[in-house]
Image (cartoon, helix red, strand yellow):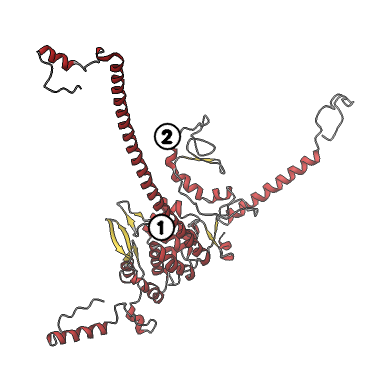
């Protein structure tokens, strides 16, 4: 690169379209990267010499580790299907079949491994936690006990309310059932009444000539047997 | 990372690794001079650290979260259960307490304010005090709860049984093995009384001499003095 001239003695004039690189900028970048790498190498070496495990130094934005606030329900995942890239299933690195950790880009085959991983310092650092927990004071403990007690009492109260509500709902259901029965009975009565009325109407319209199915069977039979009645005069 | 802990005592480590690694060489000792990391037996300790409950629920827990866990997960006391000798949540949390080493103020909250509301919290605190405090303090702190008659469920290797808070406290004071843990040998109460470290205890039933006198008088009135076979329950 010392000789900037062209191989043909004169500069080519048709290469202006090429991107011009700012060589100094890239040199500075490379120097910075190399310095950082050197520093890390040194830190790793020092940690190794001291018999410790190397962790990336913290930059002050880390948060304290806190306790889990819920149990993880792995049974929810039973029967679900997930797409896995071809070639997955070898080793832990990358996304594969199993429990995938976004922060560390690792996949675990069972929940115990997954849990141990989430407890590990490696994971804590990758999610930006320090692995330290704040000590609680007696006042905080007092407040927590009070809060838990209030929550428990509220839950109990809610349960009582729901029991009453359930009783009310049950009552309403029974009422509805009764109403339904009453309605059916009334409907049946109404239907009968209408049929009777229709029959009466037919009689008034056509007199005794009209024969309603089944009504005169008895009379016919008696007539056939030679008598007209059992001594009563009231007509049915 | 170790010096960070000693520089800033307001933090705990989220996991138990350091606690178990130190083995009493550099970590603080319990008030009774024992190393908290070795108070529970090794076999039990290893089962606890291996147990799923411990890994899931005791990671990153501080003194206030302990209350959460007790309320949520502890419905029986006991050591190890079943043929696989699974440690109970009670024992796991006791181990976590050994790591956290709460001070007397916090323990007082567990015992009094929390203990009135949550009996298993009191049971846990009482157990922890028996493991770590000096014998004088153990007697002083535990004896008031000989009047707590709430029921406790105790789960052992051969099933579940019923016990009471006062019975549990009495076991802690008298027995040498409770909840899969050999309790350290305390001096007897009368020894401490002779050394004038403790006042003689007054039973809620009244003093033994008064009871005996009363009984004697009654018997003299009734039968004209038969001294044999006096039974007094204290």
Relative image position of residue A22 (x, y in whole percent): 81, 37
Against B27, residue A57 (above or below) is above
Q: CA distance from mark 1 to mark 2?
A: 32 Å
Q: Residues within 10 Å of mark 2 (few under 14, many from 20)?
A: few
For marks 1 and 2, give the one nearer the viewer.
2
Q: Quadrant of residue B81?
A: bottom left
Relative image position of residue B190 (x, y in whole percent): 32, 81
Q: Nearer the viewer, residue A207 or B81?
A: A207
Residue at figure coordinates x 30%, y 32% from the top left: A185
Regarding mark 2 in the picture, which secondary structure is present there?
Answer: loop
Is B89 displayed left or right of A220 in the figure? right
User: Which residue reaches farthest right?
Assistant: A10
Q: Nearer the viewer, residue B182 or B24?
A: B182
Q: Residues within 10 Å of mark 1 (few under 14, many from 20)?
A: many
Q: Chain of mark 2?
A: A
Q: In what quadrant of the picture does the C terminus of chain B appear? A: bottom left
Q: Nearer the viewer, residue A10 or B200?
A: B200
Relative image position of residue B53 (x, y in whole percent): 41, 52
Residue at figure coordinates x 73%, y 46% from the top left: A32
Q: Nearer the viewer, residue B162 or B42?
A: B162
Is A125 displayed left or right of B123 in the figure? right
Q: From the image, tell me which residue sits under label 1.
A: B92
Residue at figure coordinates x 37%, y 84% from the top left: B195
Q: From the image, tell me which residue sits under label 2.
A: A79
Regarding mark 1 in the picture, which secondary structure is present there?
Answer: helix
Q: Chain of mark 1?
A: B
Q: In what quadrant of the picture does the N terminus of chain B appear? A: bottom right
* Count of numbered marks: 2
Against A109, residue B87 (above or below) is below
């Amino acid at each position: 690169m010392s000789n900037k001239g062209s191989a043909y003695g004169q500069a080519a004039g048709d290469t202006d379209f090429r991107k011009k690189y700012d060589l100094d900028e890239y040199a500075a970048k490379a120097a910075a990267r190399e310095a950082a790498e050197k520093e890390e190498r040194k830190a790793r070496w020092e940690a190794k010499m001291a018999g410790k495990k190397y962790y990336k130094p913290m930059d002050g934005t880390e948060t304290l580790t806190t306790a889990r606030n819920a149990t993880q329900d792995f049974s929810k995942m039973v029967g679900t299907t997930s797409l896995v890239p071809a070639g997955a299933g070898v080793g832990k690195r990358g996304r594969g079949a199993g429990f995938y950790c976004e922060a560390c880009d690792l996949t675990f085959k069972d929940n115990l491994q997954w849990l141990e991983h989430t407890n590990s310092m490696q994971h804590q650092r990758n999610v930006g936690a320090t692995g330290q927990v704040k000590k609680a004071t007696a006042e905080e403990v007092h407040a927590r006990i009070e809060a838990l007690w209030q929550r428990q009492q509220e839950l109990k109260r809610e349960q009582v309310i729901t029991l009453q509500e359930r009783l009310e709902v049950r009552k309403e259901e029974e009422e509805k059932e009764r109403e339904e029965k009453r309605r059916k009975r009334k409907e049946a009565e109404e239907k009968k009444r209408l049929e009777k009325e229709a029959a009466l109407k037919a009689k008034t319209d056509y007199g005794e000539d009209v024969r309603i199915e089944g009504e005169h069977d008895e009379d016919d039979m008696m007539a056939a047997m030679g008598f007209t009645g059992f001594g009563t005069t009231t007509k049915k | 990372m170790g010096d960070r802990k000693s520089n800033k005592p307001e933090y705990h480590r989220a996991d138990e690794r350091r606690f178990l690694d130190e083995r009493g060489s550099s970590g603080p000792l319990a008030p009774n001079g024992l190393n908290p990391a070795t108070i529970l037996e090794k076999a039990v300790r290893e089962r606890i650290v291996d147990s799923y409950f411990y890994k899931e629920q005791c990671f990153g827990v501080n003194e206030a979260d302990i209350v959460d866990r007790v309320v949520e997960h502890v419905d029986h006391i006991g050591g190890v259960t079943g043929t696989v000798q699974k440690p109970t949540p009670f024992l796991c949390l006791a181990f976590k307490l050994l790591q956290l080493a709460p001070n007397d103020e916090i323990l007082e909250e567990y015992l009094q304010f929390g203990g009135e509301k949550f009996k298993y919290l009191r049971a846990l605190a009482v157990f922890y005090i028996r493991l770590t405090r000096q014998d004088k303090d153990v007697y002083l702190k535990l004896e008031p709860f000989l009047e707590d008659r709430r029921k406790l469920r105790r789960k052992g290797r051969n099933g579940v049984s019923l016990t009471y808070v006062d019975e549990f406290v009495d076991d802690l004071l008298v027995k040498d093995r409770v909840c899969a843990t050999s309790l350290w040998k305390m001096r007897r109460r009368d020894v401490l009384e002779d050394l004038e470290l403790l006042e003689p205890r007054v039973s809620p039933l009244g003093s033994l001499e008064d009871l005996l006198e009363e009984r004697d008088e009654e018997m003299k009135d009734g039968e004209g003095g038969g001294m044999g076979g006096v039974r007094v329950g204290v």
